């Protein structure tokens, strides 16, 4: 892993930030989806699993060996550093009070903040978000797998950016 200061956050348009995601399949899935959907880096906050754990590497299809990433204990202060680099912090939550992903004004540059399945994001992390979004659910489901949710939000950000460019 690189240090937080070693990554050129100001040059990135889309990154994933994870808090408490410790399941190796979910960590690997985040890396795989981030790479497939053109995110430039991943920041792992407290409680996240090791992306170099063999099962995470396998699930990521090796993406965690090529996508820049770092882990930090400066939490949630690292989110302020990303904001200072020009990235809006977009928190993903199943909270019905959050804006629908499909109705929210999505920023051109964003750090997609995701939390552990079950617990979700900590109040401290949510308090640092510029925007909280939810993916509308149908039926009895109230949420998606964290890697799936991050992929949907990354895709929506890419679409919003593509439609806003001349």
Image (cartoon, rainbow, N blue to C red):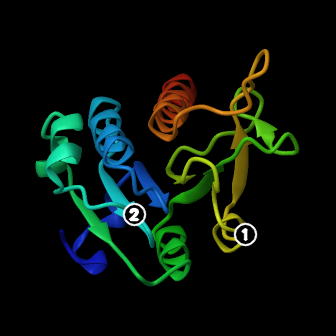
What percent of the width, then of the height, locates residue 80? 55, 76
Q: Give the answer, above or below, for where 163 lies relative to 161.
A: above
Badge 1 marks a residue whose secondary structure is helix
Pointer 2 local density, CA inside 10 Å: few below 14, some 14–19, many at least 20: many
What residue would you read off at disc 1?
Answer: 123
> Would you identify the image quadrant in which residue 21 lies?
bottom left
What percent of the width, then of the height, locates residue 148? 48, 31
Q: Which of pointers 1 and 2 lies earlier in the amino acid sequence?
A: 2
Q: Nearer the viewer, residue 38 or 166?
A: 38
What residue would you read off at disc 2?
Answer: 48
For the point 36% across and 42% down, the residue is 30
Q: CA distance from mark 1 to mark 2?
A: 17 Å
Left/right placement of residue 28 relative to residue 92 reads left
What percent of the width, then of the height, locates residue 38? 32, 36
Q: Nearer the viewer, residue 41 or 136?
A: 136
Badge 2 marks a residue whose secondary structure is loop
């Amino acid at each position: 892993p690189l240090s937080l200061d070693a990554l050129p956050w100001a040059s990135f348009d889309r990154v994933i930030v994870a808090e408490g995601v410790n399941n190796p399949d979910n960590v690997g899935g985040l890396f795989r989806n981030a790479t497939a959907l053109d995110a430039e880096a991943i920041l792992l906050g407290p409680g996240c699993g090791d992306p170099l754990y063999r099962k995470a590497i396998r699930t990521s299809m090796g993406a965690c060996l090529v996508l820049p990433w770092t882990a930090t204990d400066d939490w949630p202060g690292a989110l302020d550093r990303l904001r200072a680099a020009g990235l809006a912090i977009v928190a993903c939550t199943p909270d019905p009070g959050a804006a629908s992903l499909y109705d929210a004004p999505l920023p051109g540059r964003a750090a997609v903040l995701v939390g552990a399945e079950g617990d979700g994001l900590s109040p401290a992390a949510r308090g640092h978000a510029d925007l909280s979004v939810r993916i509308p659910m149908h039926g009895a489901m109230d949420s998606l797998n964290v890697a799936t949710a991050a992929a949907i939000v990354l895709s929506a950000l890419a679409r919003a950016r593509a439609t806003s460019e001349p």
